């Protein structure tokens, strides 16, 4: 169940739903979009219609998702959005088995939301943390996307499973693009927002000669695109908008460096961004923020360089070093890919998911 994510969300559909279907379960996905119902690779996708605006979505879309969920009369209800928490509680009161799948550390995330007035952020974050802490105690299980979030909920619920958002091995090409055929290009693919350090990336690009930044993803707010386009470095930026999964792979394969330099907000510091692992999976070295968790991964597996994400000169310096040392960069890219093949992949995570469902269905 989701009232926020799109129907083809990688974690929800391609990883969790398909893994559960392959495990022999009858899986239904409820979404709030404008598209028709469909069956996708054995998954029955039900749309309750799109609702414009955050407040309207919070009030109307969530209720429609809940009503559709009741109509399906499932054995297990698995929801992904904090705004569905009240309906998770209602499902429990009806005697249903309920799983809360939390992708983010919501209270820390609220502290950096631009649409929340600055003075309201802390009270709202504290209130949401209190509400979330109290309500999850009643659910049958909590799934978390990072060890940090898992640690928080483990003191509140007896069944907390950390299911990391690692790449699908099926998404990996059998052969990595030959390094000598790659272009002098770098890439950032993901949500394009100020707190993800895009202004610093564009400024870093301006300090580098003969380079192209491939930039793809949705911009929020839309006015931020105008801010970026006014910066030095935009003339070297190839902005592609939102692109599909195959196009994402193509961009990464032709690039020599993947950028993931989020700014040090609370929710970022303890996150494990999907793009970090996707760059590794495609065999390209990273320039990443120097957060402790990220440094531990990047340095242990020698797959990139960590920098101060607020410093465009440091970002530019790391990119320049990687572009000037092809042999070393290719080695770092291969190290990252090997780490995905051996450790950071969905195969290990899906076993946790199916194991949880097996346990809950036996009770």
Image (cartoon, rainbow, N blue to C red):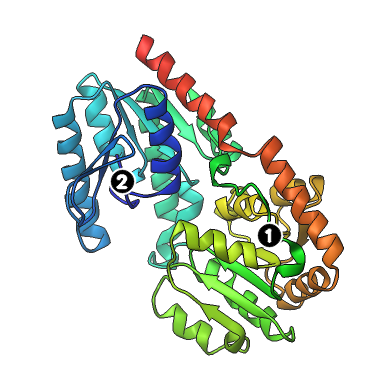
Q: Nearer the viewer, residue 279 or 134?
A: 279
Q: Is residue 240 above or below residue 329?
A: below
Q: Quadrant of residue 92?
A: top left
Q: Nearer the viewer, mark 1 or mark 2?
A: 1
Task: Give the residue at mark 1.
Answer: 177
Across and down, in percent, residue 255 comes to 66, 68
Of residues 152 and 72, the one nearer the viewer is 72
Check disc 2 and report its element: helix, strand or loop. Answer: helix
Residue at 40% in and 80% down = 223
Secondary-structure class at tag 1 = loop
Q: How many marks?
A: 2
Query: Which residue shows up at 16% across the image and 37% down it?
Result: 68
- Residue 13, position as x, y percentages in the image: 38, 42
Q: Is residue 111 something one can see in this rendering?
A: no
Q: Quadrant of the C terminus?
A: top left
Q: Which mark is residue 91?
A: none
Residue 83's label in the rendered image is: 2
């Amino acid at each position: 169940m989701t009232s926020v994510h799109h129907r083809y969300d990688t974690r929800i559909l391609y990883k969790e739903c398909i893994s559960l279907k392959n495990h022999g379960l009858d899986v239904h996905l409820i979404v709030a979009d404008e598209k028709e119902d469909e069956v996708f690779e054995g998954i029955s996708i039900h749309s309750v219609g799109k609702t414009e605006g955050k407040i309207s979505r919070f009030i109307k879309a969530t209720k429609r998702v809940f009503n559709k969920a009741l109509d399906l009369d499932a054995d297990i209800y698995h929801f992904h959005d904090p705004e569905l928490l009240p309906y998770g509680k209602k499902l429990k009161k009806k005697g249903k088995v309920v799983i809360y799948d939390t992708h983010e550390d919501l209270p820390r995330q609220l502290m950096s939301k631009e649409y929340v007035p600055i003075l309201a952020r802390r009270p709202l974050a504290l209130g949401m943390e209190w509400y979330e802490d109290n309500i999850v105690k009643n659910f049958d299980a909590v799934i978390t996307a990072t060890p940090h979030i898992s640690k928080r909920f483990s003191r509140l619920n007896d069944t907390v499973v950390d299911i990391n958002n690692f790449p699908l091995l099926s998404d990996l090409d059998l052969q990595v693009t030959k390094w000598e055929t790659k272009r002098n290009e770098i890439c950032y693919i993901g949500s394009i927002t100020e707190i993800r350090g895009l202004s610093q990336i564009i400024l870093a690009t301006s300090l580098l000669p003969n380079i192209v930044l491939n930039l793809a993803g949705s911009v929020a707010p839309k006015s931020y695109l105008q801010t970026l386009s006014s910066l030095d470095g935009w003339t070297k930026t190839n902005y592609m908008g939102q692109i599909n999964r195959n196009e994402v792979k193509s961009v990464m394969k032709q690039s020599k460096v993947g950028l993931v330099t989020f700014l040090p907000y609370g929710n970022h510091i303890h996150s494990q961004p999907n793009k970090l692992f996707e760059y590794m999976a495609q065999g390209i070295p990273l320039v990443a923020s120097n957060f402790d968790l990220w440094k531990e991964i990047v340095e242990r597996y020698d797959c990139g360089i960590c920098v101060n994400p607020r410093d465009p000169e440091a970002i530019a310096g790391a990119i320049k070093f990687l572009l000037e040392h092809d042999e070393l960069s290719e080695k770092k890219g291969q190290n990252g890919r090997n780490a995905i093949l051996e450790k950071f992949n969905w195969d290990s995570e899906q076993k946790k998911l199916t194991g949880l469902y097996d346990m809950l269905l036996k009770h």
